[in-house]
Amino acid sequence: MARLEIGVWQFVRIMVELEEGSSRKRGGSNTIYQTWREPWNEVDQRLTDLAETDQNAYSDLMMNQEIVLECAQNQIGEVKSTIAAVITSMQATLKKGGKRQKLDGLRFEVTELENLQRFLSDGGSRNPRGGPRNQKKNTTKKRGQPE
């Protein structure tokens, strides 16, 4: 199993795409959705609770923290194709236009997701931000903070 350290917001984008996709993507026991279901349920519940009680903590968790996940080598392709679907959807939204702040945010997310996709294509020997891979499993941490 490879360890993957990504931003919580990236994890949310991936899992929402998998949930909104066909049931085939969520079906078998070897799918990335099944592998990441437990940490997804935990993060989703934390975000739901914080959205109702503490917007600052919600924003901090979503944008400033990372999650460390396990991923089998044979699941990397599924993760990359899911990221590609997210990017395609975001690029379609960008083409429609809108408020500058929202579009700037989407551009940032597309760039970061493209970086993650490249990282996965390169074999994932380092985290997408350039540091060494994390060794904890299914945890969240502040970006740039030691474990």
Image (cartoon, helix red, strand yellow):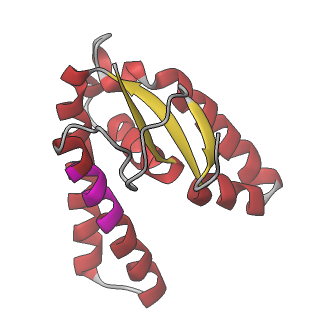
Q: Which residues are magenta?
A: 111-118
- Closer to us: 130 or 121: 130
Residue 39 vs 121, above or below: the answer is: above
**Displayed quadrant of residue 42:** top right
Is residue 7 rendered to the left or right of residue 41? left
Residue 13 vs 69, above or below: the answer is: below
**Displayed quadrant of residue 18:** top left
Residue 60 vs 4, above or below: the answer is: below
Coordinates of residue 13 in the picture (x, y in percent): 41, 49
Count of residue discs? 0
Is residue 51 rendered to the left or right of residue 86? right
Residue at the far bottom: name it. Answer: 100
Q: Quadrant of the C terminus?
A: top right
Residue located at (48% from left, 85% from top): 101
Residue at the far right: name it. Answer: 53
Residue located at (42% from left, 38% from top): 133
Residue located at (32% from left, 10% from top): 29
Residue located at (39% from left, 19% from top): 34
